[in-house]
Image (spheres, rainbow, N blue to C red):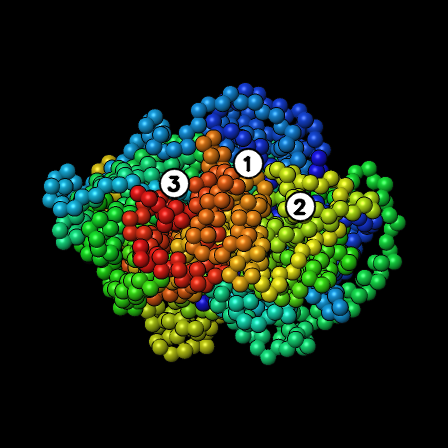
Amino acid sequence: MKNIDSYTHLRGESVYLDDIPVWNGTLYAAVFDSPIAHGVIRSLDFRAAAAAPDVYRIITAADIPGDNQIGGIVPDEELLASTHVHFCGMPIALVIARSDEAARAALKKIIVEFDPLPVITDPREAKEKNELIIPPRTFQLGDTAKAWSQCVHIFEGRADTNGQEHLYIETQGAYAVPQEHGTIRIYSSTQGPTAVQRTAARVLGIPMNKIEVDTTRLGGGFGGKEDQATTWGVLCALACALTQKPVKYSLHRMEDMRMTGKRHPYSADYKIGLSSEGKILAYEATFYQNAGAAADLSPAVMERTLFHCTNAYFIPNVKATAYSCRTHLPPNTAFRGFGGPQGMFVIEAAIAKAATAIGIPAWQLQQKNLLETGDEFPYGQKAESEASACWEAAEKAFAIKQTAEDIKVFNASNAFTKKGMAVMPICFGISFTKTLMNQARSLVHVYTDGSIGISTGAVEMGQGVNTKMLQVAATVFSVDASRIRVNSTNTYRIANTSPTAASAAADLNGKATEIACHAILHRLKQVAASHFSVTPELIEIKNETVYANGVATEWDWNKLAGMAYIQRVSLSEHAHYTPPGIHYDATVEKGHPFAYHVYGTAIITTTVDCIRGTYTFDSVKVVHDFGTSMNTLIDTGQCEGGIVQGIGWMTMEEIVYDSNGKLRSNALSTYKVPDIYSAPGEIIIEPLKTDKDNLAIFRSKAVGEPPLMYGIAAYFALRNAILAFHPGADIPYDAPMTPEKVLMSLYSTK
Amino acid sequence: MRGTLRDICCHNGWCFNGSIIVTLSVNTLTLIQFILNNETIATSLPPGTVLLDFIRYHQHLHGTKIGCREGDCGACTVLVGEHVNGAVHYQSMTSCLMAIGNAHTKHIVTVEGINTDGLTPVQQAMADEGATQCGFCTPGFVISLTGFCLSSEATGTEKAIASIDGNICRCTGYKSIERAAARTTAILAGCTEEDRLNFLVRNKIVPGYFSGIKERLQQLQSMVSTRRLPDLAATQERPRVLGGGTDLYVQQHSEMTYAPIEFLFDHPELTAIQQENNTCLIGPSVTVSDLMASPVITTALPSFHQYAKLVSSTPIRNMATLAGNFINASPIGDFTIMFLALDAQLVFTMQQQQRTVPLRSLYKGYKQLDKSPEETIQQIRFELPGANTLFHFEKVSKRTHLDIASVNSAIRLEMNGNEIEEAGLSAGGVGPVPMYLAKSSSFLKGKTVTVELVEELITVMKTEISPISDVRGSKAYKTLLLPQLIKAHFMTLFPALAAQYTAMRNQG
């Protein structure tokens, strides 16, 4: 089934935040943000700005009726800076004007003076100065201290990954409209409507039931709108409450890039020990997460780095410690993979380093250490592993060994063009690691004409979750898809939602929808059973026809719905779902935090131009563990998109802050994401054939985040190509591997 | 003072026409008229109003999206149809960088203007391949691919993909879009050039009203020409002369709306590319796409198309002018680097006075030109390469396409057998201005091409450059990269030399 939004998408008729028709009298907001990364606000002069044409009002921290606080996990982030600024781009004031143009023009007339304070941009420096968001955490399995003595090979090193700008093509934005009785409706481009609602209520000092957040869809999110859409929604709500007028703010691209956080850059130290047979016996890692100026989601991101620090490998002795380091950058936030990719890069770097030193291909070490079912993760959960199955299927379908041989031959006969290959097995846990967030609700109505409406807490942002919700209802009811409408995500209809994140939205909301549909179906069957004088178990609905005792009756779906109503039987259900069996005890760092894991193996091949230092990716070949995909078009699309985004993170996407904490890569002209020509020559996605049961909706495993991590192979493929040209090359384990780093490595002299 | 120059580097790997002043009478338009989809528009809004804003906020057509407002994402792509030589010629352009004044007498097509009942074959191909996820970039892709169908180049998947080289998608990873592009190409099988528009209408790739656009544009043009207001040359502020607008609208977006603007749009004499003996004469409002389509250019420089593909994207090349690239004075302007090697000459005029300035002596310092604000470019000239001329251009950027160079370089060699009679070597990104490497160029004169010569050339070259670290690369990188590009010039132009390098490499 195609994405149910494709028709309106392709006709340009889908409605995004900036497409919502504005009410008469709507005012426009624009943020005045800090031009410096750290300092005390000495004075603010709004006189000229306030007197500028069409300016309605200027709002500062002093105007906030409730708490000036937006921190979700840790209350450490002001909505509007009151006395101190902590990063370039931190909102200080909000200009409200009668036009978008006037609001932005007035920003230029605000005069601010600061007493600057020292700026930290490096997480290691922050850690040295004990600038930590939360206390460090350590995951442990076995005893590394004892294990080192059994290791024949021990290697140590450092590995760094840079951040990543989300670059959702639709920028952040919100539109708040006053309603009666002091309530406010916020249209928000958010992955977390409840976060916007909760924070708006807190900032305005009013109960949550007075804030309605409505989200139809996002023009891309990727985690960037999980927590960081809140600022804009709340600012608009604040202005709306203070002016009693509709207030809209749709950010310009450079405002968005400057003021919002990104994927966390990480620096890490590792130590890996192996047996003579190449078994990894011990692994230690210390992660320095660059959290930025406030907690945002950093503690949760840091946690997932630890959960995924051994990727798809079983290592009997592990000790991994992570520090969430406070710097003066915009608070970094969720981004597809949520700390997992950063953890995986380090173990892959350790394996690559070991393999190079031992003199064998890294893929041989990788394969030797794959998780098997029953193996224990450092956090105590036992694997139900598909790691080897994926690897073997990849070997069978794509001939890893032969590819390596072919590349050798190619490289031997090409002086200035070298190919490189790398394999990336993945293992990614599905569930919010904060166990309580694993709950969802779905509201299903069957109307008397047989049409069906679904509301859930899931936000559609291109991942096709609405299509999957529709498929669930169509399957359970056995009705035509055209009967079903999936509604906007709205906090009046569905309360206390978890954000659409962690790849889990389809599972959680889908299961809730499934339960709701089954409850309605059960009642409908009773109605039919009583009419046809059979037991409800003998009633079946197939393709909209009611069957009694296996025989088609004259009742169709419409009739059934109508009869239920006449008999005063409820045609609505509001169902709740939480996955069974998950738990986690952070005091001992052990538990069973994930409903299941997603596995896969990717092979990436690159060709490097050793004169120019430029490169292309020939192919990405993957065996992916979909479970049993409920929508191959959507799931394949998630894989392809995730892979290219992952390759972008590993190659051309380079975030540059200067030492003053100012973003230099602040526009699409200086921050490059993959274009159509930088996509790999071919991407092949083969599903792992498995019929095992799992906790996913219709056994169709979550697919949002895992494929991004295949992109990590891009870095190591480039590394191998460089080594083919210059075996002694000094190649830092420092992603992204830009053409600059490639050329510098090709001609390095160490 | 150079009133309209900005000290910010160009975007998209391309520097735009913001400051060409051409001696023209100022036709201040009070009424801008064009066809938007199937509707004739007459508006008295300021001619500098951004077309994107006009479409979204005045016409409430929300299918055209805002992604970046600097021509780098393609979400706002529209088609611009112009009536030339008896046919309507459509090109894709980014409406975020386009003044409504530049839409005057044109046909502007947004996604709403190609929607028919159900999906068009282009839309259907994208739906079938799952080529839309969040959907925000999607109308831009639909427009670009439909523009491909309308263009005379509509053959082959490669060209279909070229038509979407300015569209960024963050969701799909492009493979599904490539598959949709391939399907689109297949749909066009059997379409002949003479029958193109009928074919497209028949197959519902564009709606039926497209058949009447030619006549409507003709009518509009004739109507408009009689409605011109008298010259208002006495404006206090010197008007900004607007070509493609692809730089001015990036840098001075808010100022441009109400600025007095002199448009170049309806001056065919400024868009000419002519050949006089061995000299090529290029008008100041010639766009990059014009150059790419010109037989004069492509005959003399067979690889020009390949080089130009490295610069920006199709919609930007459709708007941006060569002259703008020169006057922007970006140290890494790609065409500036090419034409420095080609020894282009600029003819400036001021109050009927003419002056010819070699491009090589135009740049006096970072964004400083040997040009007074009153002087305007009248023409660009260069000697067309002959049978003994070798020319090559190299560019490396973080992203190969639609990006700004870290370092670029061009070389022109006049050969006499194995001997270099005359040489021109230029490089960008290694100094405050686009550099003609004079010492290196004269060093090559009279020399025979060998590996040793290339190494010696690099030594000379290094005395001429002064790269700095910036967002496009570190000083060390640029210092390493330019010698590599010089090697690449010689290895490309002299296969025997490339073989020698290979042999040396294999011997370790």
Residue A266 quadrant: top left
A677 or B5: nearer the viewer: B5
Q: Return the x and y of residue B456 as percentages of the image width and height.
A: 46, 48
Tag 3–tag 2 contact (CB < 8 Å): no
Measured Cα–Cα span from mark 3 to mark 2? 39 Å
Residue at image point 58% right, 61% down: B389
How crowded pointer 3 is (Cα within 10 Å; few <14, some 14-19, many 20+) is rated as many
Q: Return the x and y of residue A642 as percentages of the image width and height.
A: 41, 55
Count all numbered tags in the image, as a single digit.
3
Q: Return the x and y of residue A662 as percentages of the image width and height.
A: 49, 34
Label 3 and label 2 in one chain: no
A581 relative to A16 in the view: left or right: left
Tag in front: 3 or 2: 2
In this view, B130 is above or below B444: below
**Pointer 3 chain:** A
A157 relative to A670 in the view: left or right: left
How crowded pointer 2 is (Cα within 10 Å; few <14, some 14-19, many 20+) is rated as many
Quadrant (top left/top right/bottom left/bottom right) for the N terminus of chain A: bottom left
Q: Name which residue type carries label 2.
A: Ile
Label 2 and label 1 in one chain: no
**Pointer 2 chain:** B
Q: Name which residue type carries label 3.
A: Pro
Query: Which residue is disc 3 drawn over?
Result: A265
Label 1 sits on a secondary structure element that is helix
Label 2 sits on a secondary structure element that is helix
Query: Which residue is disc 2 drawn over?
Result: B327
Residue at image point 57% right, 56% down: B421
Q: Return the x and y of residue A517 as percentages of the image width and height.
A: 40, 60
Mark 3 or mark 1: which comes first in sequence? 1
Query: Which residue is disc 1 drawn over?
Result: A235
Quadrant (top left/top right/bottom left/bottom right) for the C terminus of chain A: top left
